[in-house]
Image (spheres, helix red, strand yellow):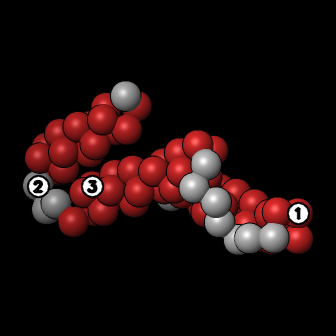
Amino acid sequence: PLGLMFTCLAIVTGSLWGQPTWGTWWVWDARLTSMFILTLFYIGFIVSHKLTLQEEKANKISSIVAIIGLI
C-alpha cells in the first residue's frame, strides 16, 4: 500500500507539473507509461492478496503477480 501511495503521488504531481510545462496532463512516453504499469501491478498485487481467502493460495498468487511485475 505504501508503494502504491507513492506511485500515485508521483503520477499526480507529475501531471500537475507537466500541464504548465508541456501543455498537456498526460503523454504516453516511456516514463509515464512505466509508472502507470507499476500502479496496475501494485493494485493487482494488493487485490490478489486481500481477496483470496486461503492464506497459502493468496501468497502464491501474490508471488506470481510480483514476479511478473519484476520482469
The residue nearer to you, when weighing 10 against 45, is: 10
The percent coordinates of residue 28 (x first, y second) are: 57, 55
The percent coordinates of residue 7 (x first, y second) are: 61, 55
The percent coordinates of residue 53 (x first, y second) are: 13, 62
- Give the Cα separation between the discs numbered 3 and 2: 10 Å
Mark 3: secondary structure: helix
The answer, for residue 57, to whether it is visible in the render is yes
Query: Residue drawn at (53%, 45%), measured in percent from left and top?
Result: 34
Q: Label 1, on which residue? A: 21
Q: Quadrant of residue 30 in the image?
A: top right
Q: Residues within 10 Å of mark 3 (few under 14, many from 20)?
A: many
Query: Residue drawn at (23%, 37%), measured in percent from left and top?
Result: 64
- Give the Cα separation between the discs numbered 1 and 2: 48 Å
The residue nearer to you, when weighing 42 against 35, is: 35
> Tag 3 or tag 1, which sits nearer the N-term?
1
Q: Label 2, on which residue? A: 54
Of tags 3 and 2, which is closer to the observer? 3
Q: Quadrant of residue 11 in the image?
A: bottom right
Q: Which residue is situated farthest in the front direction here?
A: 23
Q: Which residue is situated farthest in the right direction here?
A: 20
Query: Residue drawn at (31%, 32%), measured in percent from left and top?
Result: 67
The residue nearer to you, when weighing 27 against 68, is: 27
**Which disc, if any, is residue 30?**
none
Residue type highlighted by circle 1? Thr
Image-based side of 32 in relation to 14, left or right: left
Q: Residues within 10 Å of mark 2 (few under 14, many from 20)?
A: few
Query: Residue drawn at (32%, 56%), measured in percent from left and top?
Result: 44
Q: Label 3, on which residue? A: 49
